Structure formats: structure tokens, C-alpha cells
Amino acid sequence: MGGIRIGAGAKIRDQGWRAPQVAAIVWPFSRGEGFTLDESSQARRVARLRIVLIVCLVASSLANATIAPAKTIRVPETLMRSVTFDGARGRVALTSRPTHIGFTWEGSHDSGVSYRTIDETGHVSKWRVAPLSHDMEVGSSRFTGLMAVDRPVNVEYRKELGKKSEDEWMGPITMESINTLDGPKREVALTSTTQSDPAAPAIVTRSEWGADERLKSSTGGCKRTFHPLRQIFVHHTAGSNHDRNGAATMRAIYAYHTQSRGWCDIGYNFIIDWSGTIYEGRWARNYGPWETHDSEDYRNNVVTGAHVGGFNSGSVGISLMGNFTNIGPPLAMKTSLKGMLAWEADRHDLNPTGTHTFNGRRMRVIAGHRDAGQTACPGNKVYAQLPKFRRKTKALIGTGRRTTRLNLETSAALVPYGRSVGVSGTLVHSSGQPLANRPVTLYIKYRGGRWKQQSTLMTGSKGRFAATLTPHKKVSIAATFSTRPSYWGSDSRVARVRVKHVVTIAPNDRNPDSTGLYHYATTERRAVIGGRVRPSHAGKSVRVRLFRRPPKGSYKEVAEKWPTLDNNGRFAHSFFLPNRKSGTRYRVAARMPRDGAHEGGFSGSKYLVVD
């Protein structure tokens, strides 16, 4: 395969310590000293001695490795202070001189904060709206991104409420004041400066950007979990743009996530700064010096982060450092993002331009945060470029696989309850030739439910597949062809089938004649009308109407009732028959209204005659 591919999704892994190569070892026994294969006891002693010598060599090597001094760097301690204040606006004097600030509060969805800074010379900055960060937002808790500031002595704030209605509210504000440059220096041992994967982009490790590993937690409820990578999410940090010190901001984000939000660790798997530098985010495990810090375990499963609520397991979060609501990312950042996307997609056999079902939702394999949550992340200017990023990513990987197309159709778009519908389609590759003997997986999602795998079908000689489904309510159907060594996977359009109520009606107190008419005498005052609705909808009501037509004239409605359905969906009502002259006709009909899961159903009419 062309591009950056180095194998079938494999990574270079050391399988454990290997003894160093030794040019020659002189053993105390040799063939010239009477050693024969028949002397088994002597052979066992030789084998044991060899093991002892190898163990000695291992111990010596490990001792030397332990004695060798590790490379270290000196990193400032992160200083963090919190101050809480209330009131519509005000000024906060800072006891520490922050490099970054962030705000948190409880409030309605449209609540926000504007701020400006005052430095030691008295210079006042412009008012700025603190951009909201919706990553893992819970309930009424609101968070902003981290804004880089130049060590101000005061911060002025004002609360911002959207619609100014009674529903808008905002509680006290807590400002996190973080300084990642001026604290006392601490020694950090560099865990890795090499990468085993030659195709991997350059990644600044946690130790290299100065992560204080005491801040994270990886036990109890924070125990790391790993899952096969199926989804890539693109984010932005919603912080300041044109950041000149990405490592310092990484330390600030790390402290903000763990100390202010109370997360186990930094939420994203990777972060890319303004210059295009890529940083390792959430801790996955202890890596060997020969390993790439890829946010994965030894089985190539990705560590679960905290970047998209409900969609973290099996996804990787790549965040762009900045706020891209109104401006686009710089070229260096985009170049690094495309490289990261290509590296992840290629190693895990993901189709960069594909669509699939992930955690019950249909979405792009490379998606923005907003595709899985109520958020503006990754900002309008990045989100608008995602289609281009997908195409560029696929081009970077190369053309080793051919594109496939998957068609899906149903035999009907509307079926009565209990009726089956045919589902069929074709799988072809980019040249239009059918792909035979390939597995196609059907997924279905009923109204109000989640996507579930229905069945796996094999294509025939013409690339066709077919199945039969008997839906009990509105259903969405999609087909997926998974990536194969020679072909990219593909996804069909989503086909939707509506299901309508089945309603029957008839007089319960007599049988019809050969023409379908029900006969009543002029002395009979009432007709007992009954029927059934499927599905049953026990406890709900069905609309039943009675119409009368005199011997000369047209039908006019004379009664309408809403009888309640029993547990089997049955109903009955005794209608009074007015003006029972010989030759008078009546018509009865029932309709079950549509609901969220079913279309409305009509019984058709039954006719009564007085004679």
C-alpha cells in the first residue's frame, strides 16, 4: 500500500528483554573432553550451567541499564489558585500572576462570561468573551476554555445572559488562575526520545512537555480501559489563539482538567498547537524507550479518554489548541492534523471518507465533536474543513485499496403492521464490477432505539444481497461493508420504512350477507360495533365514526366515539341508530391516529342497511 503504511496495521513491539549477542562462550565441557550424547546427567549439568551464565549476563546488563543516568529536564511547577465571586460584574485582584485563566459556574445554557485584564502598568485589555468548552459538560455546570494571559494583576469580569428571560440564570463564578512558567523548577526524567514507528508523526511525550504525573489518577474509578479504535473525533480546546508556548499551555490544560474539572487525567488523546507540534495527551501506560507514545496498549487498543460523553470508548480525540469559531487554523496545524489522521486511520484500517455506526449513531469515521454532542466544537472554521481533511487524509494513505460502493433499497417505504419488507442491495468496486462472496452487515434502528447489528449477508455472483425484515414500528436500515486488504469499506444510505396501524371494524351482533351488507330491522335501535388495532396500544383510544344516508340523499356523520383499546387491542361500542326508516343505510369506520412509532391506520368502511 502506498503512503505511510508500514504493514497490516502492525506496530514494532519489543517482545521482552533479549540477551546481548556474545561472540563466543567457552564451556567447561566439549567433545574433546569426553562429552557424549549418552551422558544425560552430564548434559543436564551443562544445561544448568549455561542457564546460570545467561542469568548472570542478564543481571549484569540490567544493572548497567539501572546505573546509566536518565536524561532529565527542569520544568516549572504548576501554580494554581481558585477564587469565587458573584455579582453582575466586578474586579478581582490576583495574588499570583497567571499565565492562563479559566472560568466555571452553574447556569443556564446561554450564560457566559466576558473578561478583561489589567497589568502592573495599569494597561487595560479589550473586553473578550470567554469561549465555552462543552467537552464532557454535565447538567448545568459550565466551563470555558483556558485563555492565555500575560501575568495580569487584576481581572475584570461581567456575567453574560443570553435572552434575558426568566429561564436564564447564572450562579457564582469560580476563576482558575494558573501559572505554568514561574513556579519552582522540578526534575522530570525523559521517558522516551525515539519512536519505533517510522511512519508516526513526531509526538512530544508527556515527560517532554512536563506533565506532573502526580496530578493524574489511574486506579479505582480512574482505572484505564482500552478498546479497538473505530472512531476519530476532532476538537478544539476553545482557548487562546496564536499561542507561542504550547508546552506551557499543555501543563495548564492538564491542571485545569484534573484539578478544576476533577477528571482522572487530561481529556484528549493528542493535542496540536499553533506551530503544528503534536503533544501526547491522556496517559495510556508506561512505554519502553523504543516505543512510540501512541495512546494505545500492546494490543493496539486505544485508551479511553474524556472528550465526547457517551462516545469515548473506542475513539481517539485529537484537539487543536485554540478557538476556531471565527478564524481558521494555521497551515502548520492543518498539516500536522492531516498527518495524525492518516497515521491513525491507516494503522487501524479505517476509511477516512467513510460513514459507519458508532455507539448507536451514524456518523463519519472522522467526525467533529458536534456530530456526537450539543456543542460548537471544533469551531465552525474547522468543522467546515473536515470534508477536505478527510479527502487529504485518504490521499496521504495512498491508493492501495480500491473504493467500493454499497447500494441499499427496500421493497416498500410504508407497510402495514405485521407485513414483511424486502431489503436488498449491491456491492461494487470503483470500476462498477460486482464484488461477489463479500460480507455485508445490516444494521437496524427502531424509533427511539439504538443501532443494532441485524445480520451478516454474503453477496452473490452479481454482488447482490437480500434479506427480509418484519418491522414492528418505524425502522431505519443501513448496510456496511468492512475494510478489506484490497478494498476500502463503504456504507449505504440509510433507508427508512414506516409502519402503519392495522385497523379492523364490523358489527359484532350479526354476520354480513353475500354482498357484505349487515341487515337491521326498523325496530332495532342499536348496533354493537367492534374491531381491533394492531399493534395493541392497550389503554389508548381509537376514533370510530357512524354515518347515515337516508333513502334519498348522501352520507352525513351522526356520531363519533373514542373507545379505549383493551390489552389485545380490541374495542367495542354500542351505537344508537337514528331515523331507522326502511332503506336507510349506515356506514361505520375506524381510524387509529399516528404516533411517534406508527403511521395512522384506517379500517375501511362497513355498511349497515335497515329493511
Image (tube, rainbow, N blue to C red):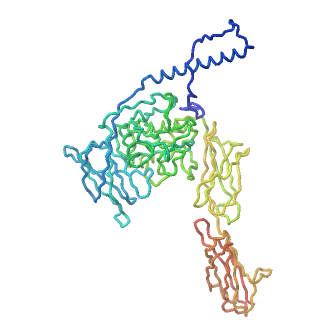
Residue 286 lies, with reference to residue 520, above or below; the image says above
Looking at the picture, tell me which residue is in the foreground, 331 or 221.
Answer: 221
- On screen, residue 252 versus residue 465, left or right, reads left
Looking at the picture, tell me which residue is in the foreground, 387 or 554.
Answer: 387
- On screen, residue 357 versus residue 381, left or right, reads right
The image position of residue 270, as x and y in percent, is: 45, 40
Q: For residue 486, what is the image quadrant? A: top right
Image quadrant containing the C terminus: bottom right
Looking at the picture, tell me which residue is in the foreground, 375 or 35.
Answer: 35
The image position of residue 309, as x and y in percent, is: 49, 51
Task: Please tell me how many numbered marks the rendered image carries.
Answer: 0
Q: Residue at x 35, y 56 (%)?
A: 112
Residue 566 lies, with reference to residue 241, above or below; the image says below
The image position of residue 442, as x and y in percent, is: 65, 51
Image quadrant containing the N terminus: top right
The image position of residue 544, as x and y in percent, is: 64, 79
Looking at the picture, tell me which residue is in the foreground, 219 or 233.
Answer: 219
